[in-house]
Image (cartoon, grey):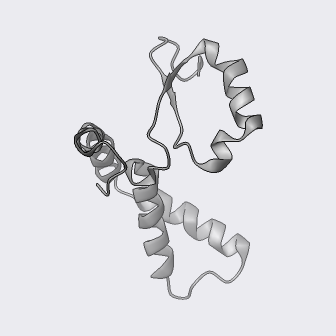
Amino acid sequence: MSIVHSDGLGQFQHDNATPHTSRVATKWLQKHSSGFRHFHWPPKSPEMNIIEDIRDALLHAVENRSPPPRTPMDLWTVLKDEWCELPPRYLQTLVESMPHRVAALLCVGCPTRY
């Protein structure tokens, strides 16, 4: 965190999925979180996470490949190629959508489909 956000303004965020809230993960976070702020994310709200949108875009691109990837290495290559093809504006739009996503969640007070 100190390398990426040397200004001290970075925040750590996770989606509170079950693996992220295990005793081991929680203990590690408590031990290491003194050096950064922790953004408290609503439990199990993947629809709020722009990573889900990116994953869906990549999955759609892979599914539309002809021929489809046949080996794990083929899949890795296709994913890297498709990642490079994502328009920067698409990624920027997802980032800019966060205030609206958070506002929608706060309005209903529980996980919502954005």
In this rendering, position of residue 31 left or right of residue 89: right
Q: Compared with residue 39, is residue 47 higher up or lower down, i.e. above or below? A: below
User: Residue 40 at what x, y percent from top left?
Assistant: 47, 30
Quadrant in the picture for residue 67: bottom right
Q: Quadrant of the N terminus?
A: top right
Question: Residue placed at 25% from the left, 46% from the top?
Answer: 108
Count of labels in the image:
0
Please tell me in which quadrant of the rendered image residue 23 appears.
Answer: top right
Q: Quadrant of the C terminus?
A: bottom left
Is residue 109 left or right of 60 when viewed as pictured? left
Indicate the quadrant where residue 87 lies. Answer: bottom left
Q: Quick one: which residue is furthest to the front in this view?
A: 109
- Decide which of 40, 10 is in the foreground and name it: 40
Q: Position of residue 34 (x, y in %)?
A: 63, 13
In the displayed orientation, state which residue is furthest to the bottom. 67
Give coordinates of residue 73: x percent, y percent.
72, 71
Q: Is residue 74 left or right of residue 90?
A: right
Residue found at x 47% / y 11%: 7
Coordinates of residue 55 in the picture (x, y in percent) = 48, 61
Q: Residue at x 32, y 53 (%)?
A: 112
Identity of the residue drawn at 39% across and 54% down: 47
